[in-house]
Amino acid sequence: MIQVDGFEKAIIGLGSSFGRSDVLVYDTQQIMDILVDRDGMTDEEAREYFEFNILGSYNGEGMPIFVDTQATDAADY
């Protein structure tokens, strides 16, 4: 399983899918909260950093899943 270094507190579980190995599941909002608190980013900077440097990276099989637990409307999906 691939971890996102420095964001262990944002792990919310494991994800499974038929024919694939388990992967770590992260809470997107918790990652951005860490970026704001730890690194002093604004909310906008944290979202941009997350989308480009974490969500936008591919590191091979076992990449984590990122869940937006703040989405409350089906239109958010």
Image (cartoon, rainbow, N blue to C red):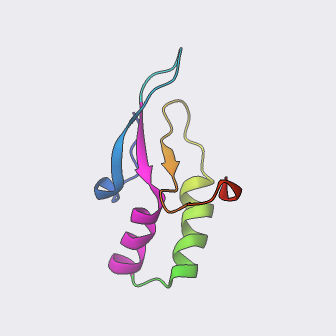
- In the displayed structure, 20 sits above or below 30; it is above
Residue drawn where x is 51% and y is 74% of the image:
46
Q: Residue at x 62, y 59 (%)?
A: 73
Which of the image's four quarters has the N terminus? Answer: top left
Give percent across and percent down for residue 15.
44, 33
Q: Quadrant of residue 48?
A: bottom right
As drawn, which residue projects farthest toward the top? 19
Q: Is residue 50 magenta?
A: no
Q: Residue furthest right?
A: 75
Residue for point 50% across, 85% down: 42
Left/right placement of residue 13 relative to residue 19 reads: left
- Residue 31 location (% of width, % of height): 42, 63
Give the magenta range: 23-39
Q: Would you say 10 lies left or right of 52 here?
A: left
Q: Nearer the viewer, residue 23 or 53?
A: 23
Q: Considering depth in this image, is 15 or 55 the residue closer to the camera?
A: 15
What secondary structure is the magenta-colored segment mainly? Answer: helix
Q: Is residue 48 left or right of residue 30?
A: right
x, y percent for residue 27 = 43, 55
Q: Quadrant of residue 10?
A: bottom left
- Residue at position x 40%, y 72% in the image: 33
x and y percentages locating residue 70 in the rendered image: 50, 63
